[in-house]
Amino acid sequence: MRLPQMDLNLFQVFDAIYGKRNLTRAAEILCITQPAVSNALARMRRALNDPLFISTPQGMVPTPLADNIAGHVGEALQLLNAAFSQGETFVPATSRKIFRVSMPDLAESLLLPVLGEALQHEAPGIRIESYYTGRSDIPLELANGNVHLAIDAPLIDDPQVRQTPLPSDRHACMLRPDHPFAGDSLTLEDYLALDHIHISSRRHGLGHVDTALRKLGRRRSIRMRVQHYLVAPLIALRTDLALTAPLRLLQGYDARRFELPFELPPLEWHCYWHRSMDHDQANIWLRGKFTVAIAALQGEPPHVG
């Protein structure tokens, strides 16, 4: 089956079903009826001689062929949309655009308050939807337009994805104001004598702090393991547990902060977008706003102590 023999509208239906895994929800985002979606899927099944999606109690499960073409279909639709929108003028003050952004909870807590304040004054009609997308899924989600920008560690290498580094942040150790430790600085022995909070979304495995300590042949005592950055300072403020985290996060709490007595790589984030958005005015504008938000956080040199 050659492309000229295919109705290009069918690919939009395919992309919607692949993203939603549900015919009714696909119909809703396409603003057509569910029977129309079913009819379009039937036409595409005949054209490609493959069921494409199998109906199960958990939703429409894609076949191997559907998985193989999904990224290409999404990227092609993105490129077409970008080609038609490049001539449009993006006016933030009057725009009603919805931006979907993927970022971890730490990035949300630091960047979105600054970004939200800016949007309130400059672009009150724009809406931001933030949710976390698994790192391995980011290239596909950017390609099919489900995500417009992603903030994540510099570990994504895909030829279709553009990226730019954001300013890094160093780590520090936080203790509550009336913590029993009375020193003005931490030696390695002081640090290892403390009980610690470890932040990880994984059930098992070492984090970057423990990896760095293992290289020194040392190990810390972890008394609590949590999934998210935002809860960890609240625990440290009410216990004798120590928290090692990015300094920008720790500065938001009334606590004692100490330089680490060992070398630890800085926290690094990159901003990712699909190559089809290189010249999209709205996407360029949002990338700029995140750069401004980071710059606002970088304003004054972080103070430890």
Image (cartoon, rainbow, N blue to C red):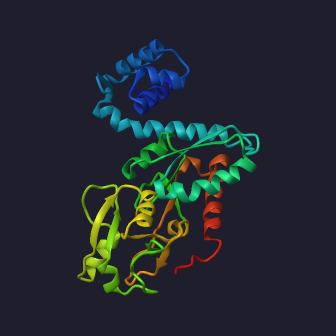
| Residue 78 location (% of width, % of height) | 54, 40
Would residue 101 appear left or right of 91 to someone viewing this image? left
Q: Is 93 positioned to the left or the right of 262 in the image?
A: right
Rendered image quadrant of residue 198: bottom left
Residue 98 visible in rendering = yes
Q: Position of residue 203 (x, y in %)?
A: 26, 55
Residue 102 lies left or right of residue 186; in this view the side is right
**Among all residues in the image, which is located at the extreme top?**
35
| Depth order, front residue of 6/148 | 148
* Residue 291 at x, y percent in the picture: 62, 61
* Residue in the image at 35% along x and 66% along y: 197
Residue 108 horizontal/vertical position (percent)? 52, 54
Residue at 41 percent across and 81 percent down: it is 260
Residue visible at 55% across and 65% down in the picture: 252
| 117 over 125 or under it: above or below | below
Q: Could you tell me how many numbered marks the image carries? A: 0
In this view, the residue in front, 76 or 166, is 166
Q: Is residue 6 visible?
A: no
- Quadrant of the frame with the N terminus: top left
The residue located at (45%, 36%) in the rendering is 73
Rendered view: 302 above or below 43: below
In this picture, is 67 found above or below 58?
below
* Front residue (pair 128, 173): 173
